[in-house]
Image (cartoon, grey):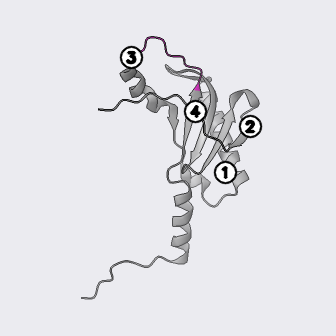
């Protein structure tokens, strides 16, 4: 029996694979006005995941940059409305930062009508981590 080592993708499958790879490691990080006082670091590290949001990336495939930004803006506006602008334990939401495969970053500021701003420089976001 002659079994090929790999299956050749059709042009449509190759196009979809390339499109999916654009958003494979994409997510929102929520920036809040939280200030640490006496909270144990292991509690902060455990709750850090509450500041990460994922979106259904299928909605972003084959869209222009402007269309993607509109979808992302609507997503964060809805999240902000549903949470009343507060993230449990982390206090008031200041902004949302969209990380697109560590190649592009967009900031959506709640005080600026969620206007989408492309970020070129590094953002210093305090995070709590715990390693063994």
Q: Which residues are magenta?
A: 32-39
Mark 4 neighbour class, 10 Å CA radius: few under 14, some 14 to 19, many 20 or more: few
Q: Nearer the viewer, mark 3 or mark 2?
A: 3
Which secondary structure, mark 2? Answer: loop
Discs 3, 1 touching: Cβ within 8 Å = no
Q: Quadrant of residue 108?
A: top right
Q: Report the residue marked by disc 3.
A: 40
Q: Report the residue marked by disc 1.
A: 68
Closer-to-camera residue (55/38)? 38
Q: Earlier in the sequence, mark 1 or mark 2?
A: 1
Could you tell me what secondary structure mostly forms the magenta stretch?
Answer: loop
Q: What residue lies at 71% left-to-right and 41% top-to-bottom?
A: 116
The N terminus, quarter of image: bottom left
Please state if 132 lies on the left or on the right of 80 as rendered: left
**Spatial distance from mark 3 to mark 4, Cα to Cα?**
21 Å
Where is residue 98? Give x, y as percent: 60, 42
Q: Report the residue marked by disc 2.
A: 115
């Amino acid at each position: 029996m002659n079994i090929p080592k790999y299956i050749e993708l059709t042009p449509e499958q190759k196009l979809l694979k390339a499109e999916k790879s654009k958003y494979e490691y994409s997510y929102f990080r929520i920036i809040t006005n939280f200030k640490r006082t006496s909270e144990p670091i292991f509690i902060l590290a455990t709750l850090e995941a509450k500041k990460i949001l994922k979106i259904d990336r299928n909605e972003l495939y084959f869209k222009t940059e402007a269309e993607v930004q509109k979808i992302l803006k609507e997503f964060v506006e809805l999240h902000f409305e549903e949470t009343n602008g507060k993230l449990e334990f982390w206090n008031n939401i200041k902004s949302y930062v969209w990380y697109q495969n560590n190649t592009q970053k967009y900031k959506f500021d709640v005080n600026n009508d969620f206007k989408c701003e492309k970020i070129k420089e590094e953002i210093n976001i305090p995070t709590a981590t715990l390693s063994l």
